[in-house]
Amino acid sequence: MNVLVVGSGGREHVLAWKLNTSPTVDRVYVAPGNPGMDHVAERLPVNATDGEALAAAAKKHGVELTVIGPEASLLAGVADVLDREGLNVFGPKKDAARIEGSKSFAKDIMKRYGIPTAAYAVFADYEEACAYVKDKGAPIVVKADGLAAGKGVTVAMTMQEAFDALADVLLDNAFGSGAKVVLEEYLQGEEISLMALVNGDTVLPLEESQDHKRIYDNGEGSNTGGMGAYSPVSHVGTEVVEEAVDAVLRPAAAAMVTEGVPFTGVLYAGLMLTEDGPKVIEFNARFGDPEAQVILPRLEDDLSAVLMDVLDHREVELSWKPDAMLGVVAAANGYPGSYQKGLPVPGDMTFDVEDSIIFYAGVDGKRNELRSSGGRVFLLASFGETIETAQNKVYERLDALNLEGYHYRKDIGSRGVKVE
């Protein structure tokens, strides 16, 4: 069959790459994609949030399965349009995607259905929010209610930091006018990402991973869309992961059905492993980026067949490579603030997939003359028998490149290495 991937970043690159390896897939299309994907997919000049145009393109090219990558496409209702046109689509409809698009909606779902998460309150008024902070004290977590590309969260270690973050959202409209904030209890523990392929009550968990959100080493600096990840996170133990699936993912999927907004797609739980068990930091409604880039290459099964099985509510048992995979994002200097574009991008890194692979995100130009066009430009990932082996391979290759104008963290996976 022919498949269509919607989006243009690193997550969509790994989806297109993985689907391209499927013996049941004839052709992979990506809309709009980026030139770094040209070796695995044919790009279509269609906006990722234009549901009508995407449906027309899917029909024109005989697409039998569409996989939606970005959250913006989901909240624009692309899945609704494709479904209405009778097309197979893996991605939640607009109402279900609110589990990511509105943090207050997600928190209310968790509260109603007893899904473990941090204590919270929602505010639209700056003075009321400040009064809550004064009452609760610091540290406290300030979250812009809507989409913020991973940048709308402030872990305020002092009340002044919290007041400043509240001013950004509620007074300065940093994330749009009329925004609300969610103020959350500060949780302590180890953080992991856990995703599942979901269709209503059907929940198929994937392997866990650990993302690194902060721009600088040792978790310092601003939040980003993610600076690297690795999988599996063996030291947390299978029992903890199974507990999270049973306490979080399955109840959340069931809750969405009960609420009349059944979820179809990737349900992503960002979890804090606290002394009281796993608690939800956030839900996303799609594959994590960069988590997908280190999880999907470890999947031994045919992804297109797995997705169709989930859509048909068939039971599936997944197989995983035993090796770890670790990926590091190369970002333009200045990201997540203002950054330079037009940097030269390595375009001839044709590594054997059993060793290392590169996934492109913010790039344009021609395949072998790529230039940076975004903040997170590419991710380089390597397999290894251990996390340390994979880490050494990635940094050896990154350090050998001429990456003037770029920044990348030097400690991705170090927490896993320490406990191996």
Image (cartoon, helix red, strand yellow):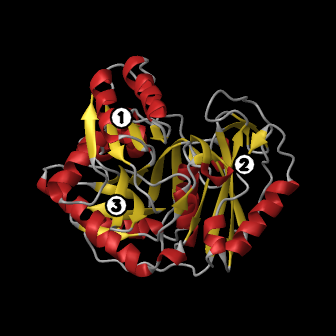
Cα–Cα gap, marks 1 and 3: 21 Å
Asked if residue 44 lies left or right of residue 148, the reply is right
Q: Earlier in the sequence, mark 1 or mark 3?
A: 1
Residue at 37 percent across and 50 percent down: it is 282
Categorize mark 1 by other alpha carbons within 10 Å: few (<14), some (14-19), many (20+): many
Give how far across and how far down residue 315 sits, in percent.
29, 77
Residue at 35 percent across and 51 percent down: it is 91
Q: Which mark is residue 408?
A: 2
Give how far across and how far down residue 304 sits, in percent.
44, 65
Give the number of callouts: 3
Q: Which mark is residue 105?
A: none
Cα–Cα gap, marks 1 and 2: 28 Å
SS under mark 3: strand
Residue 101, picture quadrant: top left
Give how far across and how far down residue 414 sits, in percent.
66, 65
Instruction: Say whether residue 215 is visible.
Output: yes
Using the image, determine if residue 293 lies above or below residue 83. Answer: below
Q: What residue is shown with label 3?
A: 279
Please, what is the three-letter code of the amino acid marked with disc 1? Gly
Judge depth for marks 1 and 3 and give the one in front: 3
Instruction: Say whether residue 78 is visible.
Output: no
C-beta proximity under 8 Å, tags 2 and 3: no
Residue at 53 percent across and 65 percent down: it is 296
Judge depth for marks 2 and 3 and give the one in front: 3
Categorize mark 2 by other alpha carbons within 10 Å: few (<14), some (14-19), many (20+): many
Q: What residue is shown with label 1?
A: 146
Please, what is the three-letter code of the amino acid marked with disc 2? Tyr
Categorize mark 3 by other alpha carbons within 10 Å: few (<14), some (14-19), many (20+): many
Pick whichever, 48 or 239, lies toward us.
Answer: 239
